[in-house]
Image (tube, rainbow, N blue to C red):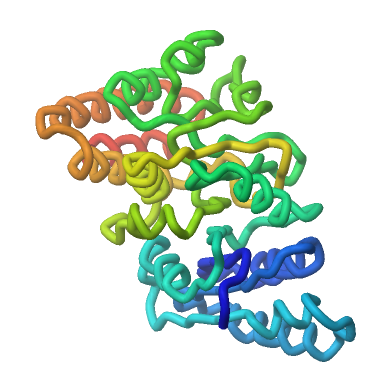
Amino acid sequence: MGKIDLSIVITSYNTKELLVGCLNSIFNNTHNLTYEVIVVDNASTDGSVTAIRKLQKTMIRQAHDPGQSQADSALQMKIITNKKNVGFGRATNQGINRANGKYVLLLNSDTIVKSNVLAGMAGWMDKRLKVGAATCALLNSDNTLQGTGGYFPSLFRVFAWMFFLDDIPLIDTLIKPFHPMHRRSPFYKGEIYYQSPREVEWITGAFMMLRKTALDKSGLFDEDYFMYTEDTDLCFRIKKYGWEVWYLPQWEITHLGGASSKSPYPILSEYAGIKLFYKKHYSVWKYPILRVILKAGALFRIIVFGLIEGKGAIKTYARAFVQA
């Protein structure tokens, strides 16, 4: 198969209904570019693979238009099935290694693509050859903005994040926060940061359009990360080789799984991911300082979120304290 405009890589684990919805949104709303879809299933047990193969057959049977039609894209869909859950980074790398596109889009299965976003962003990157990665605005199901990316987690930024200093209006404009969106802040959410196009340092893997030549330089996801912070790590290496990373709110998609969650898994995984990021990219002397900041932050959050959210939050941040 020759070179095409875009390869869309979707890694999925037990998200059958969401995945089918995501695929339908791609096929129905993507025009004026050649693309392929690569689904990597991480040993789902909910019938995901059967469902997308059925979707593929249905679309091929029902489509009649020649050329780059829904049928063409469905026919070119590649499905990779893993026998066990190998993690987001490793599974996504499997998809990237099968990609033929000039650009590679990493897309979560719990997203809805709207209004020809993919062709618009690919066209934008065609005109800006220094851009190695870009993302669009991510919206919750109620159309409120999600945070998607920010700045690398320096010690000062991690401290400000742990103790909510960057939740204070205007402070976040001075320190360039690790997470510019402050979901739990009662008075300042930080949405203004995501209302205009800007160059950033990292973007989320929920929607990450990558220039293939930038990936050839930076390498793929570091598979030492099982989930969380692997997107920050990849962007760090992309920028290390001189590429730019951009946030572009003139295009938008819906990210159904991006709303605030009280599950301990993402919190604990992010703690672990930041520690690994420091081991890989920062001076050795910074690592013990990072651990002190994370532990102090966990203690502080036990008090704050314990009062607000109760025993569940106390248990989560107690585990984070031990892990930090």
Task: From this view, report whether residue 26 is shown above or below residue 168.
Answer: below
Q: How many marks?
A: 0
Percent coordinates x, y for residue 181 in the rendering = 55, 28
Task: From this view, report whether residue 290 is shown above or below residue 89.
Answer: above
Whether residue 270 is visible here, answered yes or no, is: no
- Residue in the picture at 24% in, 29% down: 295
**Left or right of residue 53, residue 216 in this image:** left
Quadrant into which the N terminus falls: bottom right
Between 15 and 130, the one lying in front of the other is: 130
Percent coordinates x, y for residue 278 in the rendering = 22, 38
The residue positioned farthest toward the left in the image shown: 285
**Left or right of residue 61, residue 210 in this image:** left
- Residue in the picture at 45% in, 11% down: 174
Quadrant assignment, res 49: bottom right
Percent coordinates x, y for residue 56 in the rendering = 71, 84
Quadrant into which the C terminus falls: top left
- Residue in the picture at 56% in, 59% down: 105
Task: From this view, report whether residue 128 is shown above or below residue 25.
Answer: above
Task: From this view, report whether residue 267 is shown above or below residue 57.
Answer: above
**Left or right of residue 174, residue 206 in this image:** right
Percent coordinates x, y for residue 20 in the rendering = 70, 71
- Residue in the picture at 47% in, 30% down: 179
Whether residue 143 is visible here, answered yes or no, is: yes
Between 55 and 141, the one lying in front of the other is: 55
**Left or right of residue 80, residue 55 in this image:** right
The residue positioned farthest toward the top in the image shown: 170
Between 70 and 153, the one lying in front of the other is: 70
